[in-house]
Image: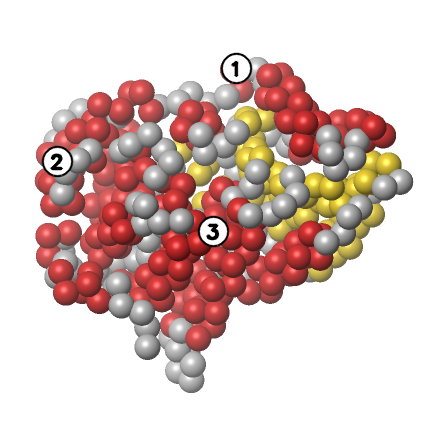
Amino acid sequence: MTAQTDSSLLIDQIRLNPHCTVAVLTLNRPKALNALNEVLVSALHHTLDRIKVDDNVVAVVLGGAGEGGFCAGGDIKAMHASVHDADNPCVAADAFFDAEYRLDHAIHTYPKPFIVWGHGIVMGGGLGLFQGAQYRVLETNANVAMPEVSIGLFPDVAASYLFHQLPQPWGRFFALTGCIMNTSEAYELGITHYQTPSGSLPVFLKRLTVAGASLDAANMSQAIERILQQMADEVDAGVKPLSRLFSIEQAVHHVFSDTSLDQVDLRARALLDDDIAPMLRDALNAMLSGSPVSVCCSDLALNVTRNMTLSDVFQFDLMLVSNMIRCPDFSEGVRAMLIDKDKQPRWMHADIASVPELLLESMLEPIQ
């Protein structure tokens, strides 16, 4: 294995045989839970472009450094600072989101076998990287979510494209609540393809190296699938977290299926008076305490993007996120949750019903 270091991105190569290597890329900001910034996004995209035309590289593996997680999302504090830049407000934030979405789209459409290995926190922009891979692997300690409603944003990075693929109304539930799912739940919903033990990426790379003498581009995908399935089959059932989806399924359908957002709000509030599962209680409380504008925009995004292509979803997200970072709820959410950490955001509106229709319509207008 050879290694290069680009500070926030580690670039390794595993030589399987004289004409066949695997690129192993590692997000390397462990103290920031590998949060994405402009430098890291640019380095990763540039590297993927270079690897794409290298005939010797037959597959790509992407992971994250440190024990905390694969990637906690974008560097939201940096986005907040950009919004409040007196000289060039929002310029850096707009550029970041554009670059991030282009990177995510490149992963979705990558022409070589692409494996993303998630562990710990896989949230926000981390899920954006994860969902585009041909092979999506989660270690059993992973936690997956799009929790943007708590900071005045919405599930971007084409998350609505992913949520539309889930059995409904689970997509709407996870989009509006930011509920954290464990590995078993992500597997049950099809968000991940394989569950493996904690710290298992080196095992995969070793097995791939052992098999490498007889591999080339033509049979790489079959070898990857075989090894990943073997590793998944070897996981002790006792190591996997229990899925809680069945225990809350009836209530989720009652609140989130085929109804207006006002009715979702009313049903959620009524359900909180009952004895319900902790997962559901936490999720409903997160939605009701999150930014009402964010909840409305998250539902709006699901509705508008329902029949869009992947490329169109990314374009829509870019327009919507540009509007939302300019909305006071974003600054307030980041202040309350990430800067002052008082957990007491003062949102523009008291509840979902109070959000003006004109405000939502303005979110669908491109920034001039």
Query: For the residue marked with disc 1, what is the amino acid?
Result: Ala
The image shows residue 1, relative to residue 82, as above or below, that is above
Is the C terminus in the top left, top right, bottom left or bottom right quadrant? bottom left
Q: Can you identify the residue that label 3 sits on?
A: 125
232 to the left or right of 304: right
| Residue 290 can be seen in this image | no
- Decide which of 180, 168 is in the foreground and name it: 168
Residue 167 appears in which quarter of the rendering? Answer: top left
- Decide which of 168, 194 is in the foreground and name it: 168
Query: For the residue marked with disc 2, what is the amino acid?
Result: Arg
Residue 191 position, x and y percent, is 45, 34
Residue 268 position, x and y percent, is 16, 37
Task: Specify which label sits upstream in the sequence, 2 or 1.
Answer: 1
Q: Distance between the residues labelled 3 and 1?
A: 30 Å
Q: Can you identify the residue that label 2 sits on?
A: 267
Looking at the rendered structure, which numbered label has been put on residue 237? 1
Q: Residue at x 40, y 29 (%)?
A: 189
Query: For the residue marked with disc 3, what is the amino acid?
Result: Gly
Task: Specify which label sits upstream in the sequence, 2 or 3.
Answer: 3
Q: How far apart are marks 2 and 1 (CA)?
A: 36 Å
The image shows residue 365, relative to residue 40, as above or below, that is below
| Residue 238 can be seen in this image | yes
Q: Is mark 1 on a helix, strand or loop?
A: helix
